[in-house]
Every structure is written in C-alpha cells, then in structure tokens.
C-alpha cells in the first residue's frame, strides 16, 4: 500500500502542526474508491499518536465489518456516539456536543461526506468537523474523491453513479494535509471479490460501477490531482508568495437547472486549478423575474446559487431593463438576496449585461453552458451567444463552453 501526501505522511509532521496551532488543524485521508485503507490508516496513526503521549480519541469510525480495521479500534479511547430516535429506529450519530465538552487534542472523524440525521445541529458531517476545528480541536478525517463537489459531473459520467453525499471544494482548501492512499487497481478488485471490502450481496453491484480497472485509474488520477493542488497551495503559503491574481472566471447561469450546475462545478474546478477568484452571474429579465418563474424553477435557481456560494464563488444577480430612475430608487434599498449582491442595469440585452459585468470585474474567462435556441434566443429572437462573442472578440477575454 502506498501513501501519497501533500506534505510528509508521518504523525510527526501533524504533531508539529498541532504544536503551532491555535485553531484546530485538519488532515484528510483521500481515497480513490472504497476499500483502499483510509479508516485503517487513520486508526494506525491514532495508535502512533497515542504512543507519543497525545490525547487522541475516536469520534466516529466506520469499520464496514472489516476484521483488520475493527481490530485497530481496540485500546483506543472512544467518545460514545449519540443515539437518535428517527422514523421508529434508534440510530447512532457523531456526538458533537460531547466532543466539544471533553475537548480531546485530536479526534478521528470518519465518513466525512455523511449526511446527518434530520434534527442534528449541522446538516453534514463536514460541517461538524469545521465546528470542531473552530473550537481548537485537531481533526483527522477521511473521504473518497468521488465526494468532491466539483467532480460530481465527471464522476457521474465516468461511473454512471450520481453521488448524493458531497463535500464542497472550499472544505478541502482548508486542509493542512491531504494524504492520498494508493493501491493497485488489480489488488483492489481482488480484495473486493474476496469479500474484504463489501458483503457478498454488494460485490456484483460494485463491479458494475466503480470497481473496474479503467475507472479506478481515472479516480486515482483525480485523487492525485487533489493532493498536488493542496501541495502547491501549501508551498506558496510557506514561501509567502502572494502575487497578483492573473485569472478571474465568471460563470453565467440561467434557470436551466442541470446546465447551471455543470457550469458552476466546471468554473469551480478551473478557478481552483488556477488559484483564481470566480463569480457567478445570473441576469434577471422581465421574462425571468421572480414573480414570473415557476416555483420549482425558482427553488432550483436558489439551490444552484447556494451551491456556487458553498464552492467559494461571489454571487451577483443583475436586474436588466431598469430605467435610471429605478436604479436610483433601488440604490437606497437593501441590495442583498439569498447571499447574492444585486445590481441594476439599463441594458436590455443579456449579452450586453454579461459583457458589462465581465469588464467591471476584470474577468479573463467567461464560462457558459452550451447554447441552444430556447436559452439564447429569448429576447426579440436575438442570438445572445453570438452577441457575446462579438463583444469579446476584440478583448483578451476567453469564452469557455461547457457541453
């Protein structure tokens, strides 16, 4: 088994971080697929830290019935789970309140992408981890790369599986160390067939989805890229390189639910790769005003704006077709909506508003969904995609079309 890290992989390095920290430190074991040994390695490290005299405890660990992993739980201090009665069943959940009360130096929190039981203080376990870090508790956690929010579309295309539990990219950027645990694809499939990863009834299903050599290799590449990006960011931080922002991305979305999500995730990945700022722009016309939108479309639009905000974007809603009098009137009113800044424009064409916005924010790349008749020819039969191309033809702004 090979461990690939964005820094050193020994507990000594994490201990050095802990001693320097006022806020809690975060270490993530990132896997390319289930069964590579994330939980196993977390428990091994916990034993090493315990031997070094550190106050390390298990907050939540998932052994999945794997004998080797379960054995490593022995002799480690465990914070009891919280029992929650839900839909006629007693379920167990991470006991966030008890961890905060006991305040161990280091806590292990497995299954990072887990959705908490309704009624919990936080909706997601990664939000629990952020609360622990803010309280000064150091966290070692684990996650598979398919749970990275901005990789949703890639993973779905690769495997045919829609991964419902996801962690925003902004969370991974806060990590002090990301370790990718690597295992040959053939060995992984062999472990699966021998029943060392899933129970017998789930093996066939796994072989039809993620557990194929080509897919595992592609997931491995995604995991290694995450580690590489984290390393690059840390090196820059250590060296004190601030530099100016060279690239700035602008994602243009509509009320098209699926297309908007793809554009947001693609822009997030691009911005992350370039370490660049990015923004999301939605142009609201009289035809697409809140009053005219169907309730479902309005809900999905707000969900997509929330997704963009979670991924680290700045959100801007532009009201077009406004007279100068209306703009002056609106300036005196509250200009925030659902976490988005609202601006007003006298422009009547969507392409004009987008170009004006790109110029104002010094955007270098505009990202849009693949244009079609119904989306881009709404206003007076004009082709807004073509109009936008004409605007940026004489500039250094690049246009990226997400298919």
Image (cartoon, rainbow, N blue to C red):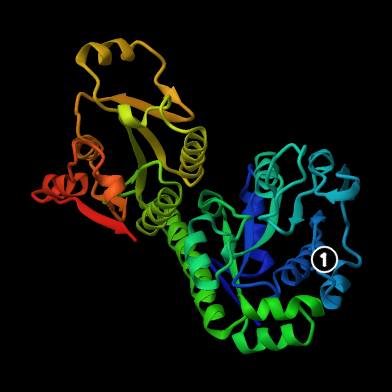
Q: Nearer the viewer, residue 198 or 6?
A: 198
Residue 245 can be seen in this image: no
Q: Position of residue 199 (x, y in %)?
A: 81, 76
- Residue 347 lies, with reference to residue 221, above or below; the image says above
* Quadrant assignment for the C terminus: bottom left
Pick the quarter of the image with the N terminus: bottom right
174 or 368, which is in the foreground?
368
**Residue ID for mark 1:** 51
- Give me the residue at 86% from left, 71% from top: 70
Q: Is residue 54 left or right of residue 208?
A: right
**Left or right placement of residue 209 versus residue 402 in this view:** right
Quarter of the figure with residue 323:
top left
Residue nearest the viewer, comparing 167 with 75: 167
Residue 24: x %, y % from top left: 66, 46
Drawn side of residue 254 relative to residue 224, left or right: left
User: Where 10 falls versus 236 (above or below)?
Assistant: below
């Amino acid at each position: 088994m090979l461990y690939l890290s964005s820094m050193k992989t020994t507990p000594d390095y994490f201990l050095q971080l802990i001693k320097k920290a006022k806020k809690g430190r975060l270490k993530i074991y990132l896997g390319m697929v289930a069964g590579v040994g994330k939980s196993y390695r977390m428990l091994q490290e916990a034993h090493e830290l315990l031997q070094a005299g550190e106050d390390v405890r298990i907050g939540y660990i998932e052994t999945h019935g794997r004998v080797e992993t379960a054995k490593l739980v022995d002799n480690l201090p465990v914070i009891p789970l919280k029992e929650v009665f839900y839909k006629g069943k007693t379920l167990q959940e991470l006991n966030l309140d008890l961890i905060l009360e006991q305040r161990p130096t280091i806590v292990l929190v497995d299954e990072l992408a887990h959705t908490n039981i309704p009624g919990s203080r936080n909706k997601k376990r990664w939000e629990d981890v952020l609360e622990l870090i803010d309280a000064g508790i150091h966290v070692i956690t684990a996650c598979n790369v398919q749970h990275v929010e901005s990789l949703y579309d890639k993973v779905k295309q690769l495997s045919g599986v829609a991964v419902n539990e996801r962690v925003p990219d902004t969370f991974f950027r806060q990590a002090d160390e990301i370790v990718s645990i690597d295992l040959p694809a053939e060995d992984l499939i062999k472990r699966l067939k021998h029943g060392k990863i899933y129970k017998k009834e789930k093996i066939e299903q796994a072989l039809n989805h993620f557990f194929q050599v080509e897919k595992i290799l592609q997931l491995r590449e995604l995991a290694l890229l995450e580690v590489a990006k984290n390393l690059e960011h840390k090196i820059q931080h250590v060296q004190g390189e601030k530099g100016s922002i060279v690239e700035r991305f602008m994602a243009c979305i509509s009320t098209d639910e699926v297309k908007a999500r793809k554009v947001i995730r693609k822009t997030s990945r691009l911005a992350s790769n370039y370490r660049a700022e990015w923004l999301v722009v939605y142009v609201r016309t009289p035809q697409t005003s809140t009053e005219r939108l169907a309730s479902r479309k309005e809900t999905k639009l707000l969900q997509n704006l929330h997704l963009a905000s979670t991924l680290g974007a700045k959100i801007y809603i532009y009201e077009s077709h406004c007279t100068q009098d209306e703009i002056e009137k609106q300036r005196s009113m509250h200009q925030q909506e659902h976490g988005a800044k609202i601006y007003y424009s006298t422009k009547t064409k969507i392409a004009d508003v987008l170009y004006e916005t790109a110029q104002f924010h010094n955007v270098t790349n505009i990202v849009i969904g693949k244009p079609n008749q119904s989306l881009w020819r709404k206003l007076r039969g004009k082709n807004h995609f073509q109009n936008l191309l004409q605007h940026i033809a004489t500039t250094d702004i690049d246009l990226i079309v997400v298919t």
